Image: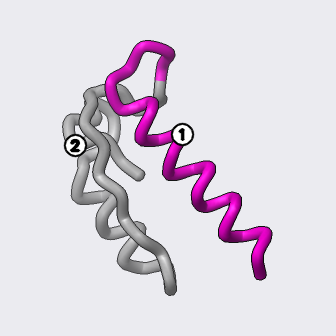
Amino acid sequence: MHCRNDARVPFEAGRRLAAGIPGARFVPLEGRNHIMLEGEPALARFLDELRSFLASDTKH
């Protein structure tokens, strides 16, 4: 997951990182911050994606 307007790390760097990890899925988030803060518009999606990932990991 990576915010489209991350002020710290370029968006494409996140995409390249995910592309280099077998089985990874890149999830773009709407936001500017590098770290999700309370009240951040992308926080709900980040948490949904994280919960989904953790739930799928326990099924293996």
Q: Position of residue 52 (x, y in %)?
A: 58, 57
Q: Mark 1: which secondary structure?
A: helix
* Crowd rating for badge 1 (residues with CA inside 10 Å; few <14, some 14–19, many 20+): few
Q: What residue occupies the far bottom of the structure in this picture?
A: 22
Q: Determine if the magenta segment contains residue 57.
A: yes
Q: Is residue 20 above or below residue 6?
A: below
Considering the whole magenta stretch, tell me its main secondary structure.
helix
| Residue linked to disc 1 | 47
In screen coordinates, is 13 left or right of 34?
left
Tell me the kind of residue under disc 1.
Leu
| Residue linked to disc 2 | 4
Tell me the kind of residue under disc 2.
Arg
Q: Mark 2: which secondary structure?
A: loop
Q: Residue at 50% of width from left, 86% of height from top?
A: 22
In screen coordinates, is 6 left or right of 44?
left
Q: Residue at 51% of width from left, 45% of height from top?
A: 48
Question: Which residues make up the magenta segment?
Answer: 37-60
Q: CA distance from mark 2 to mark 1?
A: 17 Å
Q: Residue at 71% of width from left, 70% of height from top?
A: 57
Q: Position of residue 33 (x, y in %)?
A: 35, 26
Q: Is residue 38 above or below residue 13?
A: above
In screen coordinates, is 8 left or right of 55?
left
Which of the two residues, 36 or 42, is positioned nearer the viewer here?
Answer: 42
Q: Quadrant of residue 54?
A: bottom right
